[in-house]
Image (tube, grey):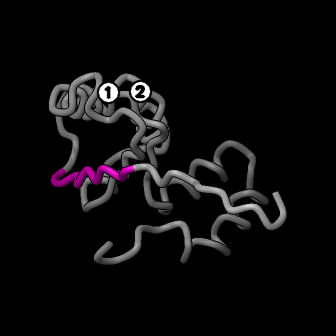
Amino acid sequence: MVGIPWELKCPNVIGVKLTGSLSGWTSAKDVILKVAGILTVKGGTGAIVEYFGPGVESLSCTGMATICNMGAEIGATTSIFPFNKRMVSYLHATNRKAIADHAESFAHVLRADEGA
């Protein structure tokens, strides 16, 4: 491919701002089911779904993983959350301190760009 022009299709990014916090009997699965209800099965096809906002802090690391895993239900190419302290705590709790330390050293690039 040296010297030959090529194209790379940039996927659409769908931002999902999470506000408030989970309460009572609600779970991370309720969040993705609500998103799926809004976007429908084809609404996220080929897109990256990026979750952000103050509501992210109320989700556990496994809750974020559940939401990302179920992103396929809306056709998303992938789903992402910003790196946070809950992820660090999870990595420490699952005996992955080295990974947690490495991720923390790159925390500044594992967050959403302000205003993007």
Under tag 1, what secondary structure?
A: helix
Under tag 2, what secondary structure?
A: helix
Instruction: Name the residue at 37% across, 32% down.
Output: 45
Within the magenta stretch, is there residue 60?
no
Instruction: Name the residue at 37% across, 46% down.
Output: 49
Image quarter in which the C terminus is found? bottom left
**2 to 95, vertically: above or below:** below
Image quarter in which the N terminus is found? bottom right
For disc 2, the neighbor class at 10 Å (few under 14, some 14 to 19, many from 20) is some
Instruction: Name the residue at 42% across, 46% down.
Output: 48
- Judging by the rendered image, the residue that carries numbered circle 2 is 70
User: Start and end of the magenta stretch?
Assistant: 12-20
Amino acid at the residue labelled 2: Met
> Is 66 on the left or on the right of 33, as rendered?
right
* Contact flag, marks 1 and 2 (Cβ < 8 Å): yes
| Mark number, residue 21 | none
**Position of residue 29 measured from the top left corner of the image (x, y, whole percent):** 32, 27
- Judging by the rendered image, the residue that carries numbered circle 1 is 29
**33 to 113, vertically: above or below:** above
Of residue 42 and residue 62, the one placed in the foreground of this image is: 42
Which of the two labelled residues, at mark 1 and mark 2, occupies the earlier sequence position?
1
Within the magenta stretch, is there residue 19?
yes
Amino acid at the residue labelled 1: Lys
> Is 102 on the left or on the right of 27, as rendered?
right
**Position of residue 84 measured from the top left corner of the image (x, y, whole percent):** 47, 62
> Is 102 on the left or on the right of 86, as rendered?
right
Instruction: Name the residue at 25% across, 54% down.
Output: 55
**111 to 15, vertically: above or below:** below
Q: Nearer the viewer, mark 1 or mark 2?
A: 2
